[in-house]
Amino acid sequence: MTDSVLYETSQDGRVAYITLNRPKRFNAIDSSMPQKIRNAVRRANADPMVRCIVLRGAGPGFCGGYDLEIFAEHAARGQTDGSQDVSKGYDPLRDYSTMRENTACFAELFYSAKPTIAQIHGAAVAGGSDIALCCDLVVMAEDARIGYPPARVWGCPTTAMWVVRIGVEKAKRMLFTGDLLSGKEAADMGLILKAVPESQLEKAVQLLADRIKDVPANQNWMHKQVINGFVEGQLQNAQKLATVFDGITRNSPEGAEASSSWTTTARSFGRWVLTPLGFAITVYGLNVIAWGGMLFLLLCNAAPAMCHPSCNDLYSSRRIWIEVDSQILNALFCVTGFGLAPWRIRDLYLWYRWRLGLGAGTRRKWFDRLAAIHANWFYQGPEPNGNSLLTTTQYNPSKGRSPTPTPRWKLHVVIWGNILNTVFQICLAASRWDQETTPQKQDKSSARAKSTFVRAGTLTGRWKAV
């Protein structure tokens, strides 16, 4: 098993690099990561050669917060229907002890005898922002994101570093809304030291660390003690209170409701159905299901009484209703094939500009436009020299999951699948029209041939759902 936290030093041994290493889970915090961060910081402090510590994340981003698939198993989070009754799973003392220990591990970065720098790309959200803001200095990519979205309903930042960094009013503004800030916005607000283009992030951090490492360790330790002394007493009390409230928010009626993915999904679907677009799509889908189910039953000879004088007779009730059903389904599928054609052609145009554009910058611009159009399901993730489009929509604090970049092959499949669906619907409509307007072909066509067209249309029609 790969270690969730890596430790290494620079060639001269004077800069220690601590790397959060769960890239497939967006470096989500598991049960062992907090203690490993603490151990790595202590290891750096015990090394007389090390003068500066850099904390960074592997893969697409810095850290997406707690991996609640793991923590729910150990702490029974969000499974109490809002009750504070210990017998139903929520043990306040156990919850506080666990989270307080994690907070103390993260705070090791703040109390470290040697300067600490957080290097943020992609995103540092929820618990990830707790870790990053405990560092003495934070340097972000301009397009990276930082914030605490769970503050809206399902959490309280236990390290309480927001007020230390940006003051009372701005801290309230961030926690009252749970908004995310870009690196540039965070720098303008004073939350972080500075923001640089993502391609220059590593170099900027290296230059800063090189500048710090030339100062004697004792000198920086004394400076840090003086500065931290202004806030340490108040910070410890705030962290204790925040940790208690964090447990309460996660197990309050609102928190329990937010943690129920079924409830959240059902309510969201209900609101969507009441919109004009949602209502139209729902009616369309129900029609496809109803007429498709009827065709399936007819093809399976589920109504023998309709086979008069025989099941394959052109004038039997069964063959007539197969014909009617096929025509209706064909019309329904043509709605998507023809009606969505302009948007599908637009996507194909953007795909073409992305794949065949001249210059990396031009291709990136068209790819960003395409990804933004499909942002409801496609998260592109950060590139080595590109952007990260993590948004509050893609980060769902109620589910407690960290966003994982969507494989790009899915974007190719959806775009080309939609185009092929439209082409097929055109061919299907032309074929059916030719059959129904040419008596010779109409007589020769069989129920099996017609139903084959409909089944193929049904399968290709599912591309939009992908």
Image: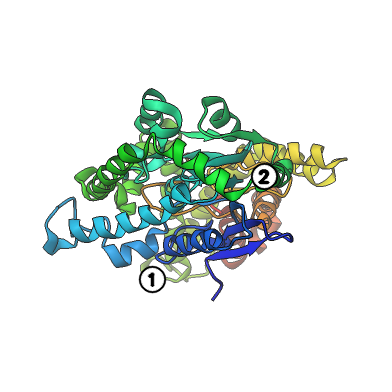
Which one is in front, 205 or 278?
205
Question: Which percent across, then down, holds residue 291?
Answer: 44, 54
Which one is in front, 188 or 122?
188
Question: Which percent across, then down, holds residue 84?
Answer: 14, 53
Circles 2 and 1, Cβ within 8 Å, touching? The answer is no
**Which residue is at the far top?**
169
Residue drawn at point x = 60 percent, y = 30 percent? 184
Q: Which mark is residue 304?
A: 1
The reply, left or right, for residue 107 in relation to residue 83 is right
Q: Amino acid at mark 2?
A: Val
Which one is in front, 250 or 432?
250
Q: Residues within 10 Å of mark 2 (few under 14, many from 20)?
A: many
Whether residue 400 is visible to the viewer of this picture, yes or no, is yes
Which one is in front, 362 or 205?
205
- The tag earlier along the polypeptide, 2 or 1, is 2
Q: CA distance from mark 2 to mark 1?
A: 77 Å
Residue drawn at point x = 42 percent, y = 63 percent? 35
* Residue that numbered label 2 is attached to: 205
Question: Which percent across, then down, holds residue 220?
Answer: 56, 44
* Above or below: residue 92 compared with residue 115: below
Question: Which image quarter: residue 348?
Answer: top right
Residue drawn at point x = 38 percent, y = 59 percent? 68
Badge 2 marks a residue whose secondary structure is helix
